[in-house]
């Protein structure tokens, strides 16, 4: 484990330059450039808000802003977008980079580091754009917003843990890469993002504890929408789970790394 971290530190400039080159090449011939990184999720917000805001606006207690539903939706999507971006990149990471892994000798751990770095840049730009929109809509922030950096770290660790495990398994069982997008679509609608958890009937609401992404989404909503600090007990449990999952993923990756190139 320490050897992987040392290798990642030695190749830190390779990681930074790869992230920069990836972002530049993605929008090289685009007139709007990096704006496309935030236009796509904001367009999704606009569509949902246009269709559902009149239906759900009255069911968002504690928010007096007339744009309450849009604010609530953006807060949930900020967490969900980071999760799905990292997960989506990691699932097919080793398959997509198979030729590079065969031709060059470099620490394989740099590949997920580059993917996560790129996703974090995208998400930070998205958060900045959302913060500006919140202010334009008349929605301010309290001291609870200081929870965003630790929540961002925990969510990144959680997403990378799941993504790295699925990415390794996908090398050996390619059906995983095909199934994940479908599962994410189902998972999205079972997570209170486009609707508040309060509209779920009480007998079924208790099942939300089985949704591992829900504590992150709920924490983002508490911080960004209601300016409340997340529940410390829940965050502690989520932090331990994220750390344990990431550790398991790194152990699995270290064990499988020598076989990845042979299978690819």
Image: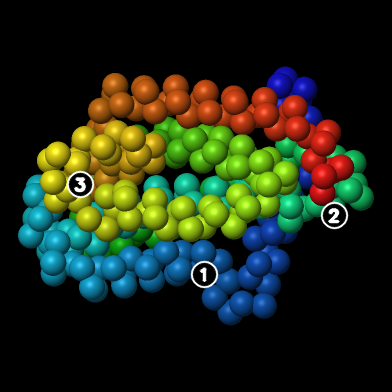
Q: Position of residue 155 (x, y in %)?
A: 45, 38
Tell me the CA gap for discs 2 and 3: 45 Å
Q: Identify residue for label 2.
A: 99
Q: Which numbered circle lies on residue 166?
A: none
Q: Is residue 12 left or right of residue 118?
A: right
Q: Identify residue for label 1.
A: 36
Q: Position of residue 100 (x, y in %)?
A: 84, 52
Q: Is residue 87 left or right of residue 68?
A: right
The N terminus sits in image quarter:
top right
Q: Is residue 55 left or right of residue 21?
A: left
For the point 13% across and 69% down, the residue is 54
For the point 60% across and 50% down, the residue is 176
| Mark 2 crowdedness (10 Å alpha carbons): few <14, some 14-19, many ≥20 | few
Q: Is residue 176 left or right of residue 5?
A: left
Q: Position of residue 168 (x, y in %)?
A: 68, 40
- Identify which residue, 73 or 149, lies in the foreground: 73
Q: Is residue 135 visible?
A: no
Give whichever of discs 2 and 3 has the lower sequence position: 2
Asked whether disc 2 touches disc 1, contact meaning CB atoms under 8 Å apart, the reply is no
Give whichever of discs 2 and 1 has the lower sequence position: 1
| Mark 1 crowdedness (10 Å alpha carbons): few <14, some 14-19, many ≥20 | some
Tell me the CA gap for discs 2 and 1: 28 Å
- Identify which residue, 259 or 24, lies in the foreground: 259
**Residue 258: quarter of image:** top right
Q: Identify residue for label 3.
A: 197
- Identify which residue, 164 or 176, lies in the foreground: 176
For the point 14% across and 61% down, the residue is 56
Tell me the CA gap for discs 1 and 3: 30 Å
For the point 61% across and 42% down, the residue is 166
């Amino acid at each position: 484990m320490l050897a992987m971290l040392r290798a990642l530190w030695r190749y830190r400039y390779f990681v930074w330059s790869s992230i920069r080159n990836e972002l530049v090449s993605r929008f090289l011939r685009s007139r709007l450039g990096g704006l496309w990184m935030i236009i796509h999720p904001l367009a999704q917000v606009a569509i949902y808000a246009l269709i559902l805001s009149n239906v759900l606006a009255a069911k968002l207690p504690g928010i007096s802003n007339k744009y309450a539903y849009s604010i609530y939706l953006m807060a949930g999507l900020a967490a969900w977008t980071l999760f799905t971006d990292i997960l989506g990149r990691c699932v097919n990471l080793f398959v997509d980079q198979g030729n590079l892994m065969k031709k060059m000798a470099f620490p394989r751990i740099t590949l997920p580091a580059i993917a996560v770095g790129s996703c974090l840049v995208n998400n930070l730009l998205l958060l900045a754009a959302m913060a500006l929109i919140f202010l334009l809509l008349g929605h301010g922030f309290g001291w609870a917003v200081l929870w965003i950096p630790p929540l961002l770290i925990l969510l990144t660790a959680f997403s990378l843990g799941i993504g790295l495990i699925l990415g390794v398994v996908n090398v050996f069982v390619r059906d995983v890469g095909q199934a994940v997008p479908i599962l994410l679509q189902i998972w999205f609608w079972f997570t209170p993002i486009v609707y508040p958890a309060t509209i779920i009937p009480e007998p079924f609401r208790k099942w939300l504890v089985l949704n591992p992404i829900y504590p992150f989404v709920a924490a983002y909503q508490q911080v960004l929408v209601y300016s409340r600090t997340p529940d410390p007990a829940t965050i502690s449990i989520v932090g331990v789970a994220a750390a344990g999952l990431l550790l398991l993923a790194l152990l699995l990756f270290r064990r499988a790394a020598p076989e990845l190139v042979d299978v690819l």
